[in-house]
Amino acid sequence: MEMKRRIFGWLWMGCLLTGIVGCSENLPEEEPIPWGPDNIWAVPSISFIFHVLDEDGQDLMNPATPGSYAGARITATFRDTVYTKDYPVDMEEGIDHDNHDGKFFATKMYGLFTSKDSYSGEYHINFSGLPQRNDYENEKIYFSWPDGSKDSITFSNKLTWENYYPVFTGSYYLNDKKVGDEMPMDIITIRKKALDESTLGTTWEPLPLKFYFFLVNEDGKDLLNPDTRDDVASNRITATFREKEYVLNDSVYADTDLPFKGLRKHQQLYNDLFYLTFGELDGMEAYEDEELVLDWGNGQKDVVTFTLKMVMVGGKPTFVRDYKLNGEVVDGERDFPIKKTSYPVFWLRKPLDF
């Protein structure tokens, strides 16, 4: 059974809730709200929320639960892209202005992440961010859990228009059993085995390593933005790691299960800043004073030296993570907002004419 739903524009609803006269004084009460082809629609993304319990009903995403999954590697795979729990993903950019006879605000891709319900205290694991404005037909998301089990979500979603209103129909299945046809969905409760000492070793798999680079001047101007420095944006920018060169945005092949994409350029949704990423590298591997060299294509380079390794102390992991930029330890809010993690963010500051 499919269910149709209408999504109403937030801007108009804001006018109604705040009682701003100017929003409605020219509209007789009996007339319909004048939606048209120029409206911008804010619609929720397609999301799936799991409440993971053990055989005794204990919350396995709660770090305090014996055998908890909180520190474990959990993944979701969609269209050959692997999303690791609590690992940041690059967000979708821009506004889609040409989707049939309407347009939508862009949707941020959150990937797979944990959350805690502020009312119930329950911990959840969420997969969120697929644009609902897109059509999907029997698409699958595969979830891999620390106890070795796997689950699949099969879903369909279709967008149609009725008098400039977006109308969505859909269906959603867990392991081929229907669980709903409405978004946002109800929380899905699943049962899993708690981890014990024999499986504890797989619990502490480190996150993959991925580097983020912003390039700005002292006034915060984005030097990767073509409108600021067209010559930098159009340069042949490369990253060199272990004597192999990766050209910006070139396709790469890596004999690994990780989504290694080499050196890529992205743009943030909310502040329009451009940035580069390099990775992902295997978090299980030990790195000792490794070098990653960024060549800006104008004779200037930046060198990141990093050490990353995991050692077990008393059956629990201790992570050693150190990063240097051009030989200097990076450990400040301005230069290194995300410190001592597997996804370091570097703010590279250069003069406008560097």
Image (cartoon, helix red, strand yellow):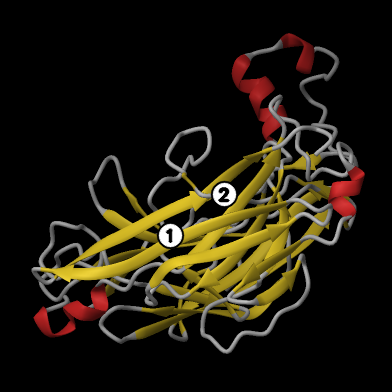
Q: Between residues 153 and 65, which one lies in front from this camera angle?
A: 65
Q: Is residue 316 rendered to the left or right of residue 326?
A: left
Between 96 and 287, the residue placed more toward the observer is 287
To which residue does mark 2 refer? 326
- Identify the residue position indicated by label 1 in the image: 342
- Amino acid type at mark 2: Asn
Q: Looking at the rendered structure, which numbered label has been put on residue 68?
A: none
* Spatial separation of the CA atoms under disc 1 and disc 2: 19 Å
**Tag 1: Cα neighbours inside 10 Å, few (<14), some, or many (≥20)?**
many
Residue at point 62% right, 57% down?
Answer: 90
Q: Position of residue 177 (x, y in %)?
A: 44, 83
**Observer able to see residue 8:** no
Report if the CB atoms under discs 1 and 2 are less than 8 Å apart. Answer: no
Q: Residues within 10 Å of mark 2 (few under 14, many from 20)?
A: some
* Residue 61 on image: x %, y %: 25, 62
In the displayed structure, would residue 63 be above or below residue 230? below
In front of the other: 275 or 236: 236
Q: Position of residue 92 (x, y in %)?
A: 69, 55
Is residue 11 placed above or below 27 in the rendered structure?
Answer: below
Seen at 21% across and 57% down, the residue is: 62
Name the amino acid type tagged 1: Ser
Q: Nearer the viewer, residue 48 or 334?
A: 334
Residue at 38 percent of width and 85 percent of height: 150
Residue 148, horizontal then vertical, whole percent: 30, 86
Q: Is residue 213 left or right of residue 305?
A: right
Give the image quarter of residue 145.
bottom left
Residue 310 occupies quadrant: bottom left
Q: Secondary structure at mark 1?
A: loop
Mark 2 residue element: loop
